């Protein structure tokens, strides 16, 4: 399919592009044509046709050399049998399949005498990728114009105005462009092909020229997606862009990579289990790791006293209190707080109840026995004794603190 094209050729360049050098050329309505980088159906483009009454069956060589017409026509065929009151739709038949031009009535009647040539500098095609479409500009590497095979017709509206329109003939895509689209315009590759299509009899074997163009001089590059707008025009239409690579990875790619990593890890483990020889670097790393672990363990053993070989009697005579008094005041404060935190609520309740009971007993004794002297500070002494007795460190608390 061909729905967009670039045509900025001057009127004098068109006959040369169509291999009409030395012939008499007549220009018709060329003032309507404007250079366009983004021409679409409904645009006026220059078209080369035969002079009226020339060409067709039984045409002599003298008539062929009389000349040709370069005429401005609208892209998008409007058949002559279209109703005069009908609104023309140029997007309905802007392409004609070469495989069916001899069968469809809209094209079959045009084949004998209404063949024409369309010269452009390049055309555009869109690559579909899901919901996205990326346009590409296709052109000749050396910059020469492309010449398309086309058919034209005339139609008169209700006001009596005559409009000339044309359609571009397409064929199946070449092997070099089938990745982009399944159809492409028929590109007439040389002077013989343009001469046969423009002036040859209707009995000519057009199938020899209506075939895909697959030469290496036809190149392409991606262009901006703004080409989708009909109003977008200018040199920016053909400027090459750099496509962004899709960095997102599919789920299957993620799991395949993860599976490959797990296989590599399993191979490494199997290699270690089987006892395969390691490299020099691996051996040195293993030795360093072993030495580090040995030094760490020995340091830990030296920092703590060894009581594993002591008997029960010897363990009871260990100077725990001396070692305990050596600890700093900060450590004592922290240990007291930790003991209070770890002390159960039941123990706290019992201790508080015992102290309160002792105070009450002392008060009753003083009331019942007034003759007995009471030594001041006795209760406080008992409290200190009881509190000091509760805080006496044990062998197990020593190991937990140091």
Image: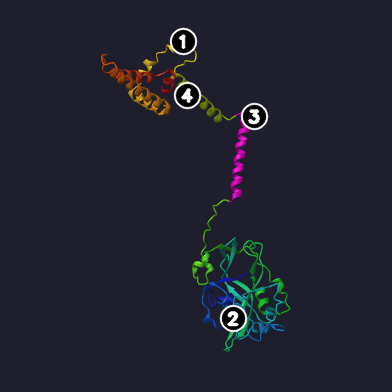
Can you say which quadrant of the picture contains the N terminus? bottom right
Spot occupied by residue 288 in the image (x, y as percentages of width and height): 51, 27
Label 3 and label 1: CA atoms lie apart by: 52 Å
Q: Is residue 119 above or below residue 360?
A: below
Q: Position of residue 90 (x, y in %)?
A: 59, 77
Label 4 or label 2, whichever comes before in sequence order: 2
Q: Which residue is mark 3?
A: 274
Question: What whole-number distance in Å separates the C-alpha atoms at marks 4 and 2?
Answer: 92 Å
Tell me how far mark 3 sits from mark 4, CA to CA. 29 Å
Q: Tell me the crowding category of disc 3: few under 14, some 14 to 19, or many 20 or more residues within 10 angstroms, Cα based.
A: few
Q: Does label 3 or label 1 sit earlier along the sequence? A: 3
Using a 10 Å C-alpha cutoff, classify the residue at mark 1 as few (fewer than 14 neighbours), some (14 to 19) or many (20 or more): few
Looking at the image, residue 332 lies above or below residue 91 = above
Relative image position of residue 76 (x, y in whole percent):
60, 77
Q: Which residues are magenta?
A: 250-277
Judge whether residue 168 is colored magenta.
no
Distance of label 4 from label 1 (alpha carbons): 32 Å
User: Closer to the camera: disc 3 or disc 1?
Assistant: 1
Look at mark 4 in the image and give the residue it sits on.
Answer: 296
Query: Which residue is denoted by mark 2 in the rendering?
Result: 88
Name the residue rendered at 49%, 67% in the picture: 236
Instruction: Give the residue drawn at x 40%, y 15%.
Output: 320
Q: Is residue 189 left or right of residue 385?
A: right
Is residue 109 or residue 301 the one in the foreground?
301
Camera-side residue: 146 or 280? 280
Helix, strand or loop for disc 4: helix
| Contact (Cβ within 8 Å) of mark 3 with mark 1 | no
**SS at mark 1 in the image:** helix
Give the class, few, some or many, for how many residues have Cα within 10 Å of label 4's Cα (few <14, many ≥20): few
């Amino acid at each position: 399919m061909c729905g967009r094209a670039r045509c900025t050729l001057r009127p004098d360049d068109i006959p040369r592009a169509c291999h009409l050098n030395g012939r008499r050329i007549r220009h018709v309505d060329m003032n309507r044509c404007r250079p366009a980088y983004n021409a679409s159906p409904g645009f006026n483009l220059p078209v080369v046709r035969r002079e009226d009454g020339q060409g067709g069956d039984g045409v002599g060589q003298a008539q062929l050399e009389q000349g040709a017409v370069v005429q401005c026509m609208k892209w998008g065929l409007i058949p002559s049998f279209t109703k005069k009151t009908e609104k023309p739709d140029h997007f309905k038949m802007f392409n004609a399949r070469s495989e069916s031009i001899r069968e469809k009535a809209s094209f079959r009647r045009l084949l004998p005498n209404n063949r024409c040539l369309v010269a452009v500098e390049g055309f555009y095609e869109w690559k579909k990728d899901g919901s996205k479409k990326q346009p590409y500009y296709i052109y000749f590497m050396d910059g020469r114009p492309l010449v398309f095979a086309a058919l034209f017709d005339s139609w008169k509206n209700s006001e009596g105005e005559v409009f000339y329109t044309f359609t571009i003939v397409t064929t199946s895509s070449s092997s070099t462009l089938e990745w982009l689209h399944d159809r492409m315009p028929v590109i007439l590759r040389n002077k013989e092909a343009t001469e046969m299509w423009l002036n040859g009899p209707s009995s000519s074997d057009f199938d020899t020229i209506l075939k895909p163009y697959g030469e290496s001089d036809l190149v392409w590059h991606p262009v901006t997606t703004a080409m989708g707008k009909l109003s977008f025009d200018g040199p920016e239409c053909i400027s090459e862009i750099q496509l962004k690579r899709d960095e997102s990875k599919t789920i299957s790619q993620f799991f395949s990579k993860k599976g490959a990593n797990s296989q590599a890890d399993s191979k490494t483990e199997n290699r270690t289990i089987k006892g395969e020889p390691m490299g020099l670097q691996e051996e040195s790393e293993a030795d360093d790791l072993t030495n580090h672990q040995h030094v760490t363990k020995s340091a830990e053993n030296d920092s703590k006293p060894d009581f594993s070989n002591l008997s029960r009697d010897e363990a009871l005579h260990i100077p725990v209190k001396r070692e305990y008094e050596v600890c700093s005041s900060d450590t004592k404060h922290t240990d007291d707080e930790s003991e209070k935190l770890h002390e159960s609520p039941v123990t706290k309740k019992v201790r508080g109840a015992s102290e309160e009971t002792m105070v009450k007993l002392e008060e009753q004794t003083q009331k019942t026995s007034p003759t007995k002297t009471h030594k001041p500070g006795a209760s406080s002494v008992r409290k200190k004794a009881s509190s000091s007795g509760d805080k006496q460190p044990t062998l197990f608390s020593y190991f937990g603190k140091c």
